[in-house]
Amino acid sequence: MAYRSKFEEQIAKRLERDGRTFLYEPSKLKYTLVCSYTPDFHLPNDVIIEAKGYLTAAMRRKYLQVKEDNPYIDLRFVFQRNNPLRKGSKKTYLSWAASNGFPAVIGPDIPPSWFD
């Protein structure tokens, strides 16, 4: 059997040596992290603006979860530039936002329509 680390292998060998029954990584368990999100800008019309220079995979997961957990909010992005999501990717910050239902622009200017 292949273990993820030498330490896990040592533990398994001890369990086997002692005649103990065990399963190694038999299933995945779900867990939820309870976090809070502080928006960068909140307009009087309840539009929330997040200003982003970088948009990492962890950040993308966070914003998708914020949207799922708070379906009533109007979250929009002002990106500093339209970078690819990762090196060599054709998907950019703007295309990620559009494909996930987030209005987004390249800033620093905010469209006047966002204030209506």
Image (cartoon, rainbow, N blue to C red):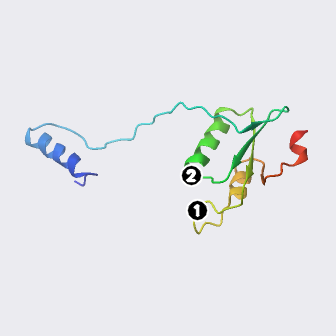
Residue 15: where, in percent of width, then height? Answer: 14, 40
SS at badge 2: helix
Outermost bottom residue: 88
Residue 35: where, in percent of width, then height? Answer: 56, 32
**Rendered view: 22 above or below 81:** above
Most foreground residue, 7 or 31: 7
Label 2 sits on residue: 57
Q: Count up the numbered dots.
A: 2
C-beta proximity under 8 Å, tags 2 and 1:
yes
Residue 61: where, in percent of width, then height? Answer: 58, 45
User: Residue drawn 62% across and 59% down?
Assistant: 85
User: Residue drawn 83% across and 51% down?
Assistant: 109
* Of pointers 2 and 1, the one earlier in the residue sequence: 2
Q: For marks 2 and 1, give the CA distance.
A: 9 Å
Left or right of 28, for residue 116: right
Label 1 sits on residue: 86
Which label belongs to residue 105?
A: none
**Rendered view: 21 above or below 84:** above
Residue 108: where, in percent of width, then height? Answer: 79, 52
User: Residue drawn 73% across and 57% down?
Assistant: 94
**Rendered view: 48 above or below 8:** above
